[in-house]
Amino acid sequence: MSSHPLSPLKGLDYSVVQQCMHCGLCLPTCPTYDATHLERHSPRGRISLMRAIADDRLEVSKTFADEMYFCLGCLACMTACPAGVNYAELFEHARAEAEQSGTLSSPRRSLLRHLTLVWLFGDLRRLQVLGRAIGWWQSTGLQSLLRRSGLLRLLPRRLRELEAMTPRVEDAFSADLIPPVLPTHGTRRFRVALLTGCAQDLTFASVNRDTAEVLARNGCEVVTPPLQHCCGSLHAHNGEWSQAQALARRNIDQFPPSEFDAIITNAGGCGSHLKHYSHLLKEDPRYAVAAQAWDAKVKDIHEWLAITGIVPPPARPEAQCVTYHESCHLCHGQKIVREPRDVLRAIPGLKLVELPESSWCCGSAGIYNLTQPEMAGDLLLRKMRHIESTGASVVATGNPGCLLQLVTGCRQRGLPLRVAHPVTLLAEAYRGA
């Protein structure tokens, strides 16, 4: 991605680095600046650090690397920026710079990164094996027994916190719930591919099933290969470009863009990355053109339903009060704001109550809640208080990381709230017939 052999930031097009006007309009939108009021924790401050490195006025240090990982990457600053600064590109280059410098390297960190980014997410069959093991642990009651025993109190605090965040693995994966080709209900208007994701497949495979059913109800033949690949967003956001590029090539090979009217994703964070394969592979002579076609075909499920129109579900007698939390990368990265609300409003008997600060980050931010638990916890508390204020019985959101974070928040506060994907609520309305 970078033309400079040694430095991602120095090899970046300088117009991207110097585009920031330092006007400060991004400051009120940045969760880390809002929490600390320190300039270095703001988008403007971080860009100044990046520019100093690009200009050879600053050496990459541990302080710089820590700052880049303290950023949530929520991209709220991009929505606020009047100059159109591409912070997403700067952010990825800065983290790659931090990784390439080795300032954060340690044997333990290197091992963890290799096990997760390369070994586990490099082949999702391994992730499924791990998921089945966790699912067995949970379904047998051993996890509940351990929690009730009090033995967890003997563990260090951080390990206790991580154990409490263990996601609930569903009983079946996407391949068990969705046929490789799901025919449309009625006349076929489109042929689409469905991406089932990584964490989504383990913890929310039912959301993938619901997405396939909704697509079929709305004139789509749905192609869902049973063995898919990670989209690469986790790798790109953590400075592992070569891995991200390799995964992008695999996905393009598995889903040739010319064979589909659309390539559907239902995960806001993944979708934001999936729509930029052309940037990731722009210097690849074999894949550059195909990547451009790929970007044009990738559609978030809410976005696609806005294009095709939603077949009205039958009227349902039971009413439900729903509020909507916006995934950062869905609203700020993909600029999809109205469409999920339209999906919810299409459901008979559903009352949509607007959530205060609906686009403020919940603290999930990929693996941010694992690497920065204190800041993530503060953001989750802020989000949950706003959700409680709506009086809703259901909170909807379009990203698996947000779903998991909000489930954790409900459990911590003992709230009897349901957390669901908008497409799940729409699928249930169809099944009500």
Image: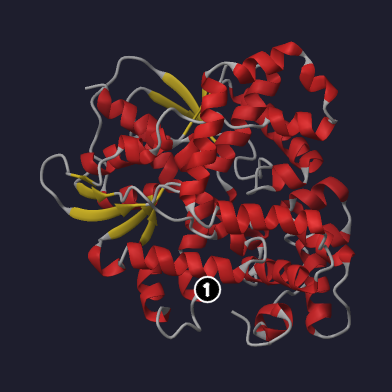
Residue at x 86%, y 62% (from the top left corner)? 40
Q: Is residue 345 left or right of residue 59?
A: left
Residue 93 in picture, x, y percent from top left: 68, 72
Give the image quarter of residue 79. bottom right
The N terminus sits in image quarter: bottom right
Q: Residues within 10 Å of mark 1 (few under 14, many from 20)?
A: many
Q: Residue at x 77, y 62 (%)?
A: 68
Q: Nearer the viewer, residue 51 or 132?
A: 132
State left or right for residue 42 relative to residue 163: right
Q: How many numbered marks are there?
A: 1
Amino acid type of the residue tagged 1 in the rendering: Leu
Q: Is residue 206 visible?
A: yes
Q: Nearer the viewer, residue 66 or 26?
A: 66
Mark yes or no: residue 344 visible: no
Q: Secondary structure at mark 1?
A: helix
Between 280 and 384, the one nearer to me in the picture: 280
Spot occupied by residue 315 in the image (x, y as percentages of width and height): 26, 22
Question: 47 or 175: which is nearer to us?
Answer: 175
Relative to 28, say whether 361 is above or below.
Answer: above
Q: Which residue is mark 1?
A: 280
